[in-house]
């Protein structure tokens, strides 16, 4: 098994002992992204829509670093601080997957890193 670490300055640096993503063969395992602006290091939490948009931009940057895009995504996991955010998160998320959306789950959890409201991880395949 050959494992390649994917890292880009266009997405936030890992805030713990993990990689932004790992490519094994044709499969990319992307760690959960939260709404950190990679240019400033600040959280984007003005609204759940803005927060989700920043998460998706961070994911896009990691995918690009692995020579992929959203069409390669086969599975997403969405973690949110409250199911009340479900509709707003979906509205932003849907703009990135207009055709043939990936499999996914969306769950509410007690807390997320840095007390954010949404975190998304994914698996993509070339």
Image (spheres, rainbow, N blue to C red):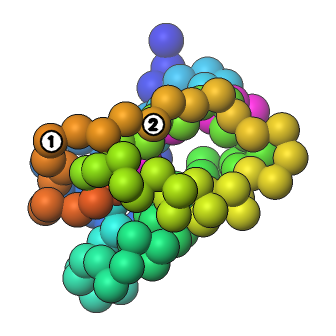
Q: Residue furthest right?
A: 99
Question: Is label 2 in contact with label 1 (beta carbons under 8 Å)?
Answer: no
Magenta region, main secondary structure: strand
Secondary structure under the numbered disc 2 in the rendered image: strand
Visible in this render: residue 42? yes
Q: Residues within 10 Å of mark 1 (few under 14, many from 20)?
A: few
Residue 120 in percent (x, y) is at 42, 47
Residue name at image x 37 percent, y 55 percent: 84
Residue name at image x 14 percent, y 47 percent: 111
Q: What residue is pinned by disc 1?
A: 110
Q: Is residue 116 left or right of residue 35?
A: left
Secondary structure under the numbered disc 1 in the rendered image: loop
Residue 55 in percent (x, y) is at 44, 63
Q: Is residue 89 left or right of residue 125?
A: left
Q: What residue is pinned by disc 2?
A: 106
Visible in this render: residue 21? no
Residue 123 lies in the magenta-colored region: yes
Quarter of the image where the C terminus is located:
top right
In the rendered image, the vertical position of residue 26 relative to residue 92, given as above or below: above
Residue name at image x 25 percent, y 51 percent: 81
Residue 89 in percent (x, y) is at 50, 59
Magenta part of the chain: 120-126
In the rendered image, the vertical position of residue 10 relative to residue 18, given as above or below: below
Residue 40 in percent (x, y) is at 28, 87
Residue 26 occupies which quadrant of the picture? top right
Q: Is residue 99 left or right of residue 119?
A: right
In the rendered image, the vertical position of residue 97 relative to residue 105, given as above or below: below
Q: Nearer the viewer, residue 88 or 6?
A: 88
Residue 5 lies in the magenta-colored region: no
């Amino acid at each position: 098994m050959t494992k390649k670490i994917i890292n880009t300055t266009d997405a936030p640096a890992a805030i713990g002992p993990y990689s932004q993503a790992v490519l094994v063969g044709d499969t990319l395992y992307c760690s959960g992204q939260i709404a950190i602006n990679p240019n400033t290091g600040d959280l984007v939490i003005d609204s759940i829509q803005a927060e989700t948009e920043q998460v998706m931009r961070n994911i896009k940057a990691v995918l690009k670093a692995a020579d992929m895009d959203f069409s390669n995504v086969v599975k997403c996991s969405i973690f949110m601080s409250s199911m009340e955010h479900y509709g707003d998160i979906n509205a932003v998320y849907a703009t990135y997957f207009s055709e043939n959306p990936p499999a996914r789950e969306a769950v509410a959890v007690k807390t997320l890193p840095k007390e954010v409201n949404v975190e998304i991880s994914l698996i993509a395949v070339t």
